[in-house]
Image: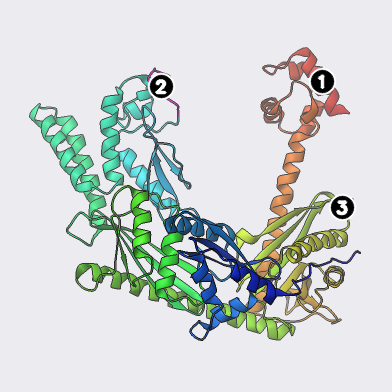
Amino acid sequence: MARHSRRKVDVNPKDRLKDILDQIPKRPGIYIMKDGKGGMLYIGKAKSLFHRVRSYFADAVDHAPRTRIFVRKVKDIKFLTTRTEQEALILESNFIKKHQPRYNVLLKDDKHYPYIRMTTQEIYPRLEVVRRIKKDGAAYFGPYTMVREVRETIRLIYKIFPLRQSNDELDGNPKRRPCLNYQMKRCLAPCAGQVTPEDYAKVVNDVILFLKGQNTQLVKSLKQKMDDASDHQHYEEAAVYRDKIEAVNTVVDKQKIVSTSQVNQDVIACTIDRGWSMVQLLVVRNGKMIAEKIYKMKNLNQEDASETLASFLKQYYADEPVLPSAILLSHAIEDTELIEQWLTEKKRSKVRLEVPQKGKKHGLVTMAEENARFAMRTELDKEDVATRSLEELQETLSLKNFPRVIEGFDISNISGTSAVGSMVYFETGKAEKAKYRRFKIKTVAGIDDYAMITEVMTRRYARLLDEGKPLPDLVLIDGGKGHLNTGYKVLQSLELEGRIDLACIAKGKFRSNLETDEVFLVGKKDPVWFRDNSPSRFLLQRVRDEAHRFAIDYHRKLRGKGALASPLEGVPGIGKKRRLMLLKHFGSLENIKNASVEELLALPGITQPIAEKINKAVTV
């Protein structure tokens, strides 16, 4: 096997850095610090790139220890200048989110929270759940912390308001007869032309008030309608409004009132410990606390609370469409005026950043700080358990490296067909699914697990070396001694022997009347035994099981695509819809093979020539 060649580090890094520092522009912009392999270490913005970047390489006595460590790793610096400092702030936020540099404070909670989308750009708006915001003229409400919470909100809306539940594109012309929801008085039947856009818009306006949390105004509106119906002796209609008022009041009672004024605020506090920051966000709308979210942020550079909050604001509000009028902070931050200006332009109305020192606002910030500290304690307790498990694993297997990052591999195929490999990623004992990778086997024909493991591991670690990305501490392969030896040869070929620990886990013999697993290590004849309730053994099993599940899922996906595409895929006149119709009608490809031309002709759209082509294709 050919050896993998790695790029050489710049022979004169100090001279090169000196040249770069001498050429730094005195303009606003962002700077990107890189290591010798081109990996990004840190991204920052500056009003003057010249003064900000050079400050890192001046007398570093006042720098935090971690800052001094990462500065020593810097071998190259790139710059992007901007017209204004505000443009630099936005560019910095976008680059940090995209590239996730190791020494920036990183917002770990990168999942997209659900929003409720009201299609106000349509004649008859409707509701739907989305996870991404688009500039499409629709109105968005949220974010919500759980999909269950969103579903419950929408269910309640449909119970209170006669909003349409269909997804049809309506142009004002009737499309069908009224449905059951219309008969139950839960819809105004716009699809049947039973309501004008103007009358329907009144319902939409009430729904928007409800979603904005302006329930006091909504109840007042509903009460007026109830009184009007009662005055005209429309008592059944008045009873409907009465029930809606009761339902809205039930929601109001569940909301925690934190201010008697109708204010929209976000309350943000943070606490820092062991290279992590925990940020608590309380969402207050119209004086009521409607949501709270906790964010865990990686903080390898040991930035203080002020720097952490500034980083959070820039990353969180970059994609947040619903902005409050005020943001209450636990600590003062740099660039307050700049961030206020940015958020104000984004909201198109004034947004203030405040650090309250007394009163109810200070009480809200104190509440957020207490919640952040509690979340941090809980997280560190979990981390301590995980650390003990990893320490036990290192001791039991005599690993050279502390197994903070474990990558697990598995192969899945049936008789060599649709062969795939999987790699799962565990960090400090927890699965990081965003870092999972799957591989379609390209170079191996037939059944050869060892060759497939060779291909997958070589592709994985050759790429990490090329890109200068961190390597795992431990590689775990699902298999026995043969798989172990194969993996070891891959590490040798890439000159990674000794830099990465390697182990295999296989189903073992019965021990104490229970089937257990055997863990094999390079250079050891016998498997390593763990105690029955060993948390480190359970961790290895979780890695193995997750790699197996991930491989099987991908294999089934490819196998399913192949079953659908072959042999009907190439038949002229048979598109996706007709293939699905044939499979749905006959139940399987085998039944299609056994079907006569007359049976095929009985299906809609199947002509004599097409039936003969299908019959010929499936019987080849």
Residue at 76% in and 38% down: 563
Secondary element under disc 2, as helix, strand or loop, is loop
| Mark closer to the observer (1, 2) | 2
What segment is highlighted magenta in the picture? 168-174
Q: Earlier in the sequence, mark 1 or mark 3?
A: 3
Label 1 to label 3: alpha-carbon separation: 34 Å
Q: Is residue 170 magenta?
A: yes
Label 3 to label 2: alpha-carbon separation: 54 Å
- Residue 451 occupies which quadrant of the picture? bottom right
Residue 548 in percent (x, y) is at 71, 60
Q: Earlier in the sequence, mark 3 or mark 2?
A: 2
Secondary element under disc 3, as helix, strand or loop, is loop
Foreground of the two, 84 or 160: 84
Residues at circles 1 and 2 in contact by the CB criterion of under 8 Å: no
Q: Amino acid at mark 3?
A: Thr
Q: Which residue is mark 1?
A: 613
Q: Amino acid at mark 1?
A: Lys
Quick check: 185 above or below 368? above
Q: Which residue is mark 2?
A: 171
